[in-house]
Amino acid sequence: MRDAAPTTIYLKDYTPFGFDVEKVELTFDLHPTKTRVKSRISFVPKPGAPSDMFLDGENLTLVSASIDGTPVHPEVSAEGLTCPVPDAPFLWEAEVEIDPENNTALEGLYMSNGMYCTQCEAQGFRKITYYPDRPDVMSVFTVEINGPHPVLLSNGNVVSTSQGHAVWHDPWPKPAYLFALVAGDLVAHSDSFVTASGRNVDLNLYVRPGDEGKCAFGMRALKASMTWDEEVYGREYDLDLFNIVAVDDFNMGAMENKGLNVFNSSAVLASPETSTDENFLRIEAIIAHEYFHNWTGNRITCRDWFQLCLKEGLTVYRDSQFTSDMRSAPVKRITDVIDLRARQFPEDQGPLAHPVRPESFQEINNFYTATVYEKGAEVIGMLRCLVGAEAYGKALDLYFGRHDGQACTIEDWLKVFEDTTGRDLGQFKRWYSQAGTPRLTVKDAWYNGTYILSFTQNLPASETTPDPQPQVIPILTGLLSPSGQEVVPSQVLEMTQATQSFTFEGLKERPIPSVLRGFSAPVVLESELAAEHTAFLLAHDTDPFNRWEAGRSLARASLLKMITDDAAPDPAYLDGIHAVVGDATLDPAYRALMLNLPGQSDLVKSLCDMGETPDPQAIWDACRAMSHAQAERLQDILPALFDAHQVTEPYEPNADQSGRRSLANAALRLVSLIDGPDRARGQFTSADNMTQQLSALGVLLRINEGTDELEAFEQQWKHDRLVMDKWFGMQVIHADPNETAATATRLTEHPDFNWKNPNRFRAVMGSLAAHHAGFHFADGQSYGLLADWLIRLDPVNPQTTARMCSAFQTWRRYDDARQQKIAAALDRILATPGLSRDTTEMLTRIRGS
Ligand SMILES: [Zn+2]
């Protein structure tokens, strides 16, 4: 069944549901193509409730329905059913039939490798039974499962279980999007946790037989998350049981269903032999994220889907605090900002721009975006910066105390801060309602001992924000003396006007400013300060983020000159990173980050801002030339860096070891540009963990070597689907631009290219889109290839298709010839008969007029 003409839903139209749902009882008789779902739901009309009740429902076959035992015959449409109801409490009973095996969209109840699994956020529950599928309807669920599987799971605590039968009860009222059911031939990796108040919690990580050896790290991360949330936020777990299930076919990373988290297997399964340090880090963060949702999302949920950032922004912020505490805070901050600039800035600066709290949507699945998640977290970081850590803690305590068990809004969230601090957050709220990345310009002046920093903020107008108003921008700033002493320590300059100056008195000599320390606001900083300040900050800044940022600014400026003026790489930049990377007193992970270059799409935006037409191949060539220049300038220290940071003790995915490996591998990447493939070959052969093996293979592919190693890797790992995702992805990522499309095409013909599996599809097509110069290669073949595959995937899995469309979001930044090719690709997809609502909405917004 296809959707009718898309309708737009508006925040301003919110109305509460007319009925309370007292309790829900569900019975599942599992069958691959004919699962029967019986529901018994106790409704209580609110004052003024309508005489007809509407229940959401999609792709359901209604078998029977009754009210208080009397059969009824509701009016059924593609979106749900309408039925006359009594004006007093009543019992609704219905039986529907669904087809999990043919549910390839992976929403609702579906099958993955023989196991049953659900995904209900945002609106998947309506594909399971008729229900008011909205987050502000919360109820207590009891679930009975009948099926021939050894493991039958749902939310909450187990009531009874026997062969082929299980009953679950969740005492905590919850919205339907947190419902989950899993049934399959699974094995548990078990442990337990005692909460601060002494509750014993059984912990299980359920996986397919054969994956038992990949569970230990995930379990450790779960227990660390539980401890951290008690210690830092005072939040305890609230059931006797916490289950995690790993699933191969999953659209997202993971899902925080109450007491039964469902994870993409790539986001939970890990072993040293098959997972990289980055994989371990990501798994630790996702496990923490989903666990933290138990309070920020489940106990306090969203009133409607426009408030998605209420749970996501806050939970991303919490998981980033957790990672900072577990590992290195500066390294976490830098990697978060790299990610923000790579994913959120292009969204915020293009046709998909929307406020952190959008005001309308057609398909809510399209708003699980970097803006809602990552910018949403940045907004909370700014709030904490403005009110201070202590007031933040008090406000959160008030939030949990006041709103436990409720479905809330951003207004509720801001109110706890206003009530705690007495501040008026009316202007701050613009961060939730205005789209776009503010530009912050800074200049300075010095008069006889008085130093003045002047800022101007400018938010470009956009379709959703036609008349932008000044926002509150916390600018964390410190001042350094010319000898590198910190003469004014970090303080928050609170900018509220379009243009604003801040004065510092009593200084002996003109200071060097370090502004926007820690990236205290998600803005684009344009500095009119003296250019030599940047090299000074790279050498002396006491704020680790800004020291890194200084290196990055010098790299960007130099690359732009190389691209536009054919200039040579800037010696001041190369000298500066030589000093930092060679400084053994600094964290190796931090030094490795110093060697990264700005993202190529980031450079595209800078070139557009300069009035230039970006040439992806020229950008690629400049980045390659800069890497060579780095290798030559650091030639005297690279071999020693490589040797000195080898890890000889048994593998641990902790911050210390992974930091050393990241610096050794950064050195390997550069030194191989000069010395050739021998070191990388040696490392590939001797590696006893995936980090070392994959790094070595990447280095070889980058210098057009590694054919034999690719084959050896495939032979070694062809039985392991998660490792094979890496094998598929890296061939595309490391291809030369003119060969990227051909490489991706060849991989789609590989017998193991199971394109209906989202992880495998993303490994090839996501890598194609991520290879900037390859995706935008002048012949346009990559555009056509991606379009072909999106057309093919859309009827099978609209959600993954729609997300992948963002590859085209920056298309207006390129030259006419490329724009024409992209427009043709977009129009071809849009002209596909029966295109999903998800993909239609995304492409219509991207395409524009
Ligand atoms: Zn989340």
Image: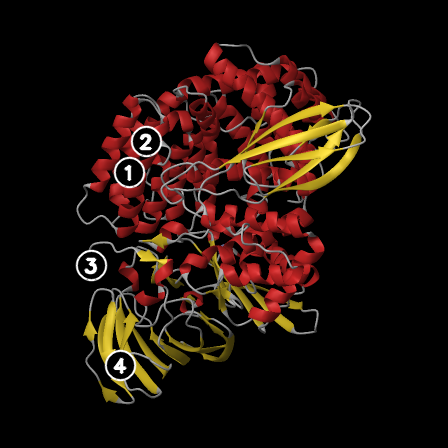
Q: Is residue 842 visible?
A: yes
Amino acid carrying label 1: it is Gly
Q: Which quadrant: the N terminus?
A: bottom left
For label 4, the residue is 51
Per the model, the C-alpha gap separating discs 4 and 3 is: 29 Å
Residue 155, image x and y in percent?
Answer: 48, 71
For label 1, the residue is 848
Amino acid carrying label 3: it is Met
Residue at image x 25%, y 69%?
Answer: 80
Q: Earlier in the sequence, mark 3 or mark 1?
A: 3
Q: Nearer the viewer, mark 3 or mark 1?
A: 1
Q: Residues within 10 Å of mark 4 (few under 14, many from 20)?
A: few
Whether disc 2's CB lies below 8 Å from ligand 1 is answered no
Q: Nearer the viewer, mark 4 or mark 3?
A: 4
Amino acid carrying label 2: it is Arg
Judge left or right: residue 253 versus residue 45. Answer: right
Front residue (pair 371, 24): 371
Q: Which quadrant: the C terminus?
A: top left
Per the model, the C-alpha gap separating discs 2 and 3 is: 33 Å
Residue 330, image x and y in percent?
Answer: 67, 39
Per the model, the C-alpha gap separating discs 2 and 4 is: 60 Å
Q: Are marks 1 and 4 in contact (CB under 8 Å)?
A: no
Front residue (pair 832, 632): 832
For label 3, the residue is 1
Residue 167, image x and y in percent?
Answer: 44, 79
For label 2, the residue is 746
Residue 762, image x and y in percent?
Answer: 39, 42
Provide the secondary structure element on which disc 3 rests.
Answer: loop
Provide the secondary structure element on which disc 1 rests.
Answer: loop
Residue at image x 69%, y 51%?
Answer: 388
Judge left or right: residue 268 versus residue 548. Answer: left
